[in-house]
């Protein structure tokens, strides 16, 4: 299968060494860096914000795939764009008007990502789908790394792939949460072309990042 991209989540990294961890991911063959931003309100966890991201920017040229699990999200989009995000992914439930937030991300010349929780239907974003660059299918309920993959999302990936092919859209399909060596092939065959992984990449094979990324690309 062509052009599979791996976006390791730094949520599973050593937060006291984030700069070096990003270098390790780049040297291990990561295609982009998945940055999980959590506010303790949209999700029951707190991580990092724009100041940390702007400090991490100098450690790599790889795209920052910034997953905003924050609400309200609209008023913070500019801060993340200025901090160095390349892809800004928002949850539709976190903005009053998805169209306005999409237009703002576009105006800031960033790639637009929209994330669907396991219980959020594709229909929620269907009116905006042609303006979206990346659709992030959550295979866990967001908030924590190391959770179990929800197999029901496989059908949602297949449905999204059908919509993409039928309408000749070219958005990326990224899957996030509980992706591991026993389910990644099914996820890719269902239609994903970008895999997010935290636990599997940082913990498997004694933390051999290069090997773990190679395995996730080996279909
Ligand atoms: C969960 C985050 C995911 C998570 C993935 O809310 O959005 O990116 O960190 O971690 P693993 O791969 O450990 O499930
Ligand atoms: Zn994420």
Image (cartoon, grey):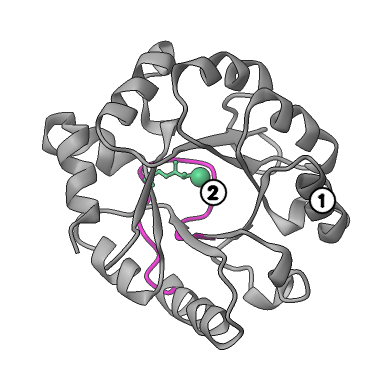
CB at disc 2 and ligand 1 closer than 8 Å: yes
Distance, label 1 to label 2, CA atoms, is 20 Å
Crowd class of label 1 (few under 14; some 14 to 19; many from 20; radius 10 Å): some
Numbered mark located on residue 67 in the image: none
Ligand 1 in which quarter: top left
Could you tell me what secondary structure mostly forms the magenta stretch? Answer: loop
Image quarter of the N terminus:
bottom left
Vertically, is 42 above or below 79?
below
Asked if residue 141 lies left or right of residue 70, the reply is left
Report which residue position mark 2 lands on: 142
- Mark toward the viewer: 1 or 2: 1
Residue 153 on image: x %, y %? 45, 71
Q: Is residue 103 left or right of residue 87?
A: right
Report the residue marked by disc 1.
Answer: 101
Q: Residue at x 35, y 59 (%)?
A: 3
**For the point 66% across and 16% down, which residue is it?**
51
In magenta, the rendered stretch is: 137-152
Q: From the viewer's perspective, is residue 160 above or below residue 139?
A: below
Left or right: 109 as drawn, with respect to 54: right
- Is the CB–ligand 2 distance for label 1 below 8 Å? no
- Count the labels in the image: 2
Between residue 23 and residue 180, name the one nearer to us. Answer: 23
Q: Nearer the viewer, residue 170 or 18?
A: 170
């Amino acid at each position: 299968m062509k052009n599979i991209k791996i976006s390791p989540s730094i949520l599973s990294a050593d937060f006291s060494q984030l700069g070096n961890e990003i270098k390790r991911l780049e040297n291990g063959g990561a295609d982009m860096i998945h940055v999980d931003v959590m506010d303790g309100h949209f999700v029951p966890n707190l991580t990092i914000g724009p100041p940390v991201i702007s400090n991490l920017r100098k450690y790599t040229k790889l795209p920052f795939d910034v997953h905003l699990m924050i609400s309200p999200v609209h008023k913070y989009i500019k801060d993340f764009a200025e901090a160095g995000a390349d892809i800004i992914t928002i949850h539709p439930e976190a903005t009053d008007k998805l169209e306005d937030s999409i237009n703002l991300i576009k105006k800031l010349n960033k790639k637009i990502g929209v994330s669907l929780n396991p219980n959020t239907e594709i229909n929620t974003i269907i009116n905006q789908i042609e303006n979206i660059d990346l659709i992030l299918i959550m295979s866990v309920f967001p908030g924590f790394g190391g959770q179990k993959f929800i197999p029901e999302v496989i059908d949602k990936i297949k449905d999204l792939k059908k919509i993409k092919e039928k309408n000749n859209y070219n958005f990326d399909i990224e899957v996030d949460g509980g992706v591991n060596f026993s389910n990644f092939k099914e996820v890719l065959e269902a239609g994903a072309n970008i895999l997010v992984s935290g636990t599997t990449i940082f913990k498997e094979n004694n933390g051999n990042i290069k090997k773990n990324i190679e395995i996730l690309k080996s279909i």
